Image: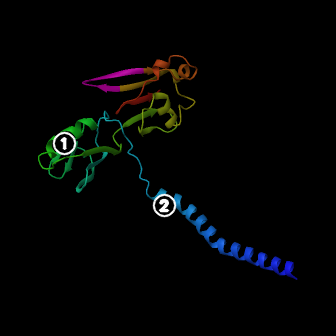
Amino acid sequence: MKPTIHHILTTGMLLLAIVAAAPAGATATDQSIAKPDSGTAETTAPPLVTDPKYIIGQGDMLDISVWKDEALTKTVVVLPDGMIAFPLIGELKAEGKTVAGLKQEMENLLSRYVSDLVLNVEVRQSNSMLVYIIGRVNNPGRQVLNSRITVLQALAMAGGPNPFAKKNNIRVFRREGAATNSYRFRYDDVVEGEHLEDNIVLQRGDVIVVP
C-alpha cells in the first residue's frame, strides 16, 4: 500500500501546484496584453512640418510653447492678414517668416518677461502650401502640399491628365517677385524617362495648366 499512497500524495501535490499557478499565469498574460494599449494612449502625433526653414503662410496652425509654463503654451492660427496673437507679446507678424526666424523673434520679446526661457515653435498643420491644377485633368482644383511635391506627383493627385489633354504642353506658372514665370512640363517625355528636369518641385501658389 505504501507505494500507492505515495503516488496519490505526489499526484495531489502536483495538481495543487498547477491550480495555484494558473491565476498568476493568467494575470501575467493580461498585463502583457494591456501594455501596448497604455503605450498607444500616451503617444502624441509628431508635428507635420519639422523644417526650421519652412516659410509660414496664412492658415498655418502653429504650436507655440514655453517650457514649464502652461499659460504660455498655445496653438495659434495665422490669420488672413498674416498675424498671430500670443500672451505677453500681443499681435505679431508670422506670415513670410521661417519657423526659425519667428522663434528667434519671439524669444527676443518673451525674454523680457520670462527668465531661463525655453521656447518651442512647430507647424502643427500646414494649410498655406496650396497649388492649383486646372484644365484637362480628371480632378481639377487646389491641392495642399504636405511635403515636397513634384509636378508629376501633383498631377497624380489630380487624377492625371484626361485622354484629350495635350500632355507635352503642360505649363507651370509661378509668381516670383513682381514677375510670373512659366515652366514647361512634357508629361509623355517625363514618364518615359526623358526631360526629367521638367519635373520641378512645386512651391506655394504654383498653377499647373493642362491644355
Q: Is residue 192 above or below residue 103?
A: above
Most foreground residue, 24 or 174: 24
- In the rendered image, which quarter is residue 130 located in? top left
Image-based side of 50 in relation to 113, left or right: right
Residue at the disc numbered 2: 38
How far from the left and from the top, in percent, is residue 192?
A: 58, 20
Q: Residue at x 61, y 70 (%)?
A: 24
Task: Name the secondary structure under disc 1.
Answer: helix
**10 Å crowding of disc 1: few (<14), some (14-19), many (20+):** some
Numbered marks: total? 2
Q: Quadrant of the N terminus?
A: bottom right
Q: Earlier in the sequence, mark 2 or mark 1?
A: 2
Mainly helix, strand or loop, the magenta region?
A: strand
Q: Which residues are magenta?
A: 174-183
Q: Is residue 47 above or below residue 35?
A: above
Which mark, residue 79? none
Q: Residue at x 61, y 64 (%)?
A: 29
Q: Identify residue type, mark 2.
A: Ser
Residue 136 can be seen in this image: no
Dots 2, 1 in contact, CB < 8 A: no
**10 Å crowding of disc 2: few (<14), some (14-19), many (20+):** few
How far from the left and from the top, in percent, is residue 151?
A: 46, 28
- Mark 2 or mark 1, whichever is nearer to me: 2
Image-based side of 12 in relation to 134, left or right: right
Residue at the disc numbered 1: 107
Most foreground residue, 50 or 181: 50
Residue 139 can be seen in this image: yes
